[in-house]
Amino acid sequence: MGIRIIGTGSYVPDQILTNQALEQMVETSDAWIRERTGIGSRRITKAGTTDMAVKAAKCAVEQAGVLPEELGLIIVGTSTGDCLFPGTACEVQAAIGAKEAACFDLSAACSGFLFSLNTACTYLKSGEYKTALVVGADTLSKTVDWKDRGTCILFGDGAGAAVIRWEDSSGGIGPFIMKADGSRGECLRCSAMPLRNPFLDKEEDVFGYMTMNGQEVFRFAVKTVPEVLEAVLEKAGVLAGDIQYFILHQANERIISSVAKRIRQPVSKFPMNLEHYGNTSGASIPILLDELNRQGKFNRGDKILLAGFGAGLTWGATFLQW
């Protein structure tokens, strides 16, 4: 028995924000952005996180060939839901008609989809559910200070999804590793709604913008991602050379290239789409996964490693056999 991905889906908004357009907003240039990040443009939503999550979910369910009523569990990895409550997963459930599904959101920033996928697999292994929908969706455009060139050049909006099922077949998803270091949380942070109760002497500041120590996050990623990839490879009992694709969180081209070098694998095994979408946080891994799937890049039995990292600080990796 194994847990397999039986359908994928993704959605990115139509609105494109190019590097050239950003040149008119902050002191930067297309060449500067591309050299340091590999990003050429990003997508910006006019509708919000739920709209994107629903569209990606519908694509995944359709490809999987399952009825919405067959879904026993929906988990949405997001840090930027349109509402504090109800959760985005509940809104997705209502929109697609998955009336039998238990629903909740999981907040792990850019690691959100990966952590949600691993959590869903654990529930399926328990026997409580057979089929689950996992979505990664984020609207980083609403957390970015568009006057801060250190962050506004990096992020975009989008959503990706996967339907997974516990079935009688070999291979599948796992093993996985998830890690966190809360003591480094200030490296990448965005404040939520302030305290507003009658017992405060002074009301706190309003919702804040994202702040990031870019150099610290870069150092963290290039060290921890290779380590967790090698740890999962050892846990799975396979060699790096046996992996067909390493699907990493699309944060920065230099990070991905550095990871490839550190584990001594060709960068051709590390597909990238961040040039067109930027860093879409929890959506980046499932968007890339769906693109590769729909391009026919995966063959039955292919060995794939997923790896994510982000605010928390959080990071992890998952092995799967297609």
Image: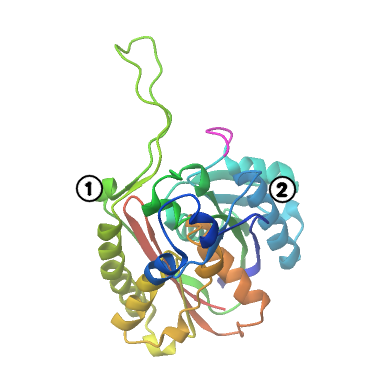
Q: CA distance from mark 1 to mark 2?
A: 38 Å
The residue carrying pointer 2 sits among few (fewer than 14), some (14 to 19) or many (20 or more) residues within 10 Å by Cα, namely: many
Dot 1 alpha-carbon crowd within 10 angstroms: few under 14, some 14 to 19, many 20 or more? few
Q: Name the residue that disc number 2 marks.
A: 98
Residue at horizontal 28 percent and vertical 47 percent from the top: 185
> According to the image, what is the colour scheme of the structure?
rainbow
The disc labelled 1 sits on which kind of residue? Ser
Q: Is residue 275 left or right of residue 169?
A: left
Up the image or down, 312 lies above or below 217; here it is above
Residue 1 falls within the magenta-colored stretch: no
Q: For the point 58% across and 65% down, which residue is it? A: 287
* Quadrant of the rendering where the C terminus is positioned: bottom right
The label on residue 183 is 1
Q: Amino acid at mark 2?
A: Ala
The location of residue 82, given as percent across then percent down, is 58, 38
Which residue reaches farthest left?
183
Q: Percent x, y for residue 102?
A: 61, 45
Q: Is residue 167 visible in this depiction of the protein?
A: no
Q: Are marks 1 and 2 in contact (CB under 8 Å)?
A: no
Screen quadrant of the N terminus: bottom right
Q: Quadrant of residue 290?
A: bottom right
Eye-nearest disc, 1 or 2: 1
**Secondary structure at numbered mark 2:** loop
Question: Observer-nearest residue: 236 or 125?
Answer: 236
Highlighted magenta segment, given as a residue range: 82-86
